[in-house]
């Protein structure tokens, strides 16, 4: 049975492993040599995320199948990053359960908006986020590919998205 739980420091190696596996597939889908910071992070980076932000794991029978990270950018704005699912488990609902847990946590913490970036030409992911009621706010090309800022409004209020532009 799949279990979603907050990551602990001792989970850092597994979080890093699942992130690298998923982001290697993502980089191939980009059809770009653009460097992805997810592929160069260290155990210390992951430990800092676990300590300083919200990191959730999806595990089954002790095996980590996915993870998602959420950072507070302001009192009203949360940012999702390093959302990773084992490619062998795609379309099994693991990502949706991880995202639901992260969004539920964001709602409980009083955030009005959740933002994330993904490649706008990675149609499978764009469709996925549209299906979860995110929309494209804007795009940039500063990282070597067309990167879309997807936004989901949890409350009907205006929020300054500027901190998400810098991510």
Image (spheres, rainbow, N blue to C red):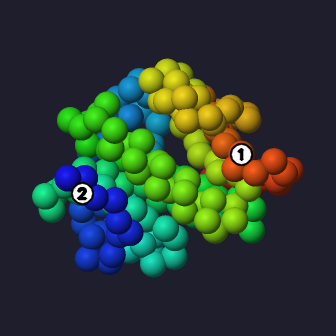
Taking the spot 74% from the left edge, 68% from the top edge, the residue there is 75
Q: Is residue 43 above or below residue 22?
A: below
Residue 45 falls in image quadrant: bottom left
Taking the spot 50% from the left edge, 56% from the top edge, the residue there is 102
Residue 163 horizontal/vertical position (percent) = 73, 57
Q: Residue furthest right?
A: 158
Taking the spot 51% from the left edge, 76% from the top edge, the residue there is 52
Does residue 29 appear in the picture of this structure?
yes
Taking the spot 84% from the left edge, 51% from the top edge, the residue there is 157
Dot 1 falls on a residue whose secondary structure is strand
The residue tagged 1 is 153
Residue 62 horizontal/vertical position (percent) = 15, 62
Q: Is residue 100 above or below residue 42?
A: above
How busy is the neighbourhood of tag 2: few (under 14 within 10 Å), some, or many (20 plus)? some
Real-space Cα separation, disc 1 to disc 2, in angstroms: 28 Å
Q: Is residue 111 above or below residue 120?
A: below
Labelled pair 1, 2 in contact (Cβ < 8 Å) = no
Residue 43 falls in image quadrant: bottom left
For residue 102, side relative to residue 84 (left or right): right
Closer-to-camera residue (14/59): 59
Residue 135 horizontal/vertical position (percent) = 67, 32
Q: Residue furthest front?
A: 1
The residue tagged 2 is 59
How busy is the neighbourhood of tag 1: few (under 14 within 10 Å), some, or many (20 plus)? some
Which mark is drawn over residue 79? none
């Amino acid at each position: 049975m799949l279990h979603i739980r907050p990551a602990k420091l001792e989970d850092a190696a597994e979080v890093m492993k699942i992130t690298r596996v998923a982001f290697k597939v993502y980089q191939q889908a980009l059809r770009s040599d653009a460097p992805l910071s997810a592929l160069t992070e260290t155990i210390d980076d992951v430990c800092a995320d676990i300590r300083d932000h919200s990191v959730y794991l999806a595990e089954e029978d002790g095996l980590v199948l996915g993870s998602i990270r959420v950072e507070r950018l302001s009192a009203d704005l949360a940012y999702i990053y390093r959302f990773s699912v084992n490619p062998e488990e795609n379309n099994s609902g693991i990502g949706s359960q991880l995202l639901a847990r992260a969004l539920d946590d964001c709602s409980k913490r009083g955030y009005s908006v959740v933002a994330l970036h993904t490649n706008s030409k990675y149609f499978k992911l764009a469709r996925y986020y549209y299906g979860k009621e995110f929309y494209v706010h804007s795009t940039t090309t500063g990282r070597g590919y067309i990167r879309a800022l997807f936004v989901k409004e949890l409350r009907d209020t205006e929020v300054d998205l500027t901190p998400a532009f810098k991510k």
